[in-house]
């Protein structure tokens, strides 16, 4: 997918690597060392370079000089890091020895929602009904009316507005609580929740994301009363009861999320049920479940109503 062959018909930006990336149809944008034509990643293509580069054993997506391998392994970003206190292996993974259930194709999103409700009824005794409900929220009106936002951005804004509208209807937007965003990515959903809350006091955001994320929006909230904290962990292994800030503050938890995959949805259900069944707050339990299902169904118009 990449080559160092001459591409005289293409313009290479001055001071940039001479390696041509075929997949992206452009030259590498890294800056070489003084006197070199190639960056460190593609330095093996230098005509007079006798140092061999090999794939990193921790992550073959990048390479390293063979004679510096041991030094690199000690500082590679892909090395195994110490597990945080809230990491509990497979705590939300379900039973290991459970009987395998045959897969069944679900024709519509509505049918998927009904299956989710059946699971909730059997596992937690919750009586819920599915209804179509498209809402919006004033916090996103300016962004929704901005013509600079393209079709994709508008779709996400509309979904986020519906999520916030349903949260407001369920009285979940307020002070003295902790919002946990599952599969947070850049943290846009938490961003809009914070905007909608305004200047309320004693609010904590926990953004759960297993991958390292670029272009996070958390920095926009520095200096505000709300506290944002990232938990880099898979939902499968997250024990929220052991998160230090919740152990200290004992805040009620509202779980939110958008566009979780099917596996993460199942783990999210187990996570919320197990946490809430140990709390003496049946009303909040019911509302949290309403919210959780609303956010995982990949459509802004579907929500759960008692």
Image: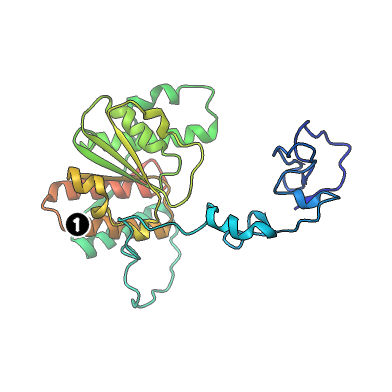
- Side of 99 relative to 273 (left or right): right
| Mark count | 1
Q: Nearer the viewer, residue 214 or 62?
A: 62
Q: Is residue 305 visible?
A: no
* Front-most of residues 194 and 69: 69
Q: Is residue 30 above or below residue 4?
A: above
**Among the 4 quarters of the image, the one containing residue 104:** bottom left
Mark 1 element type: loop
**Where, by quadrant of the figure, is residue 122 drawn?**
bottom left
Left or right of 171 on screen, residue 81: right
Left or right: residue 268 versus residue 211 is left
Q: Residue at x 19, y 45 (%)?
A: 248
Q: Residue at x 48, y 32 (%)?
A: 154
Looking at the image, residue 76 sits to the left or right of residue 134; the answer is: right
Q: Residues within 10 Å of mark 1 (few under 14, many from 20)?
A: some
Q: Is residue 148 above or below residue 134?
A: above
Residue 236's x, y, as percent? 36, 60
Q: In this orientation, which residue lies closer to the viewer: 22 or 120?
A: 22
Residue 274, percent from left and from top: 23, 60
Query: Residue 40 at what x, y percent from top left?
Result: 70, 46
**Residue labelled with disc 1:** 126
Residue at screen point 22% across, 27% down: 200
Name the colour scheme: rainbow
Q: Could you say which is closer to the camera, residue 216 or residue 276?
A: 216
State whether residue 34 appears in this view: yes
């Amino acid at each position: 997918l990449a080559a160092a062959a001459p591409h005289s018909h293409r313009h290479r930006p001055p001071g940039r690597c001479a390696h041509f990336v075929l997949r992206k149809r452009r030259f590498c944008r890294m800056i070489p060392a003084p006197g070199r034509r190639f960056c460190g990643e593609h330095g093996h293509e230098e005509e007079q370079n006798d140092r061999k580069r090999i794939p990193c054993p921790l992550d073959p997506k990048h390479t390293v000089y063979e004679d510096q391998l041991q030094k690199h392994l000690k500082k590679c970003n892909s090395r195994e890091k110490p597990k945080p206190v809230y990491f509990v292996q497979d705590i939300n993974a379900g039973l290991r020895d459970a009987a395998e259930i045959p897969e069944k194709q679900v024709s519509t999103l509505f049918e998927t929602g009904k299956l989710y409700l059946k699971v909730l009824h059997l596992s937690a005794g919750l009586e819920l009904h599915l209804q179509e409900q498209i809402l919006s929220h004033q916090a996103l009106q300016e962004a929704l009316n901005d013509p600079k936002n393209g079709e994709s951005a508008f779709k996400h804004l509309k979904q986020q507005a519906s999520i916030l509208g349903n949260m407001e209807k369920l009285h979940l937007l307020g002070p003295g609580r902790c919002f946990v965003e599952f599969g947070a990515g850049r943290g846009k959903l938490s961003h809009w929740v914070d905007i909608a809350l305004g200047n309320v006091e004693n609010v904590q955001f926990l953004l759960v994301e297993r991958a390292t994320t670029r272009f996070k929006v958390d920095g926009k909230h520095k200096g505000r009363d709300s506290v944002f904290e990232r938990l880099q962990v898979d939902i499968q292994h997250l024990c929220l009861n052991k998160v230090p800030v919740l152990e200290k503050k004992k805040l009620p938890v509202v779980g939110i999320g958008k566009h979780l995959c099917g596996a993460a949805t199942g783990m999210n259900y187990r996570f919320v049920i197990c946490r809430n069944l140990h709390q003496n707050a049946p009303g909040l339990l019911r509302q949290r479940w309403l919210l959780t299902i609303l956010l995982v169904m990949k459509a802004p118009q579907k929500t759960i109503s008692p």
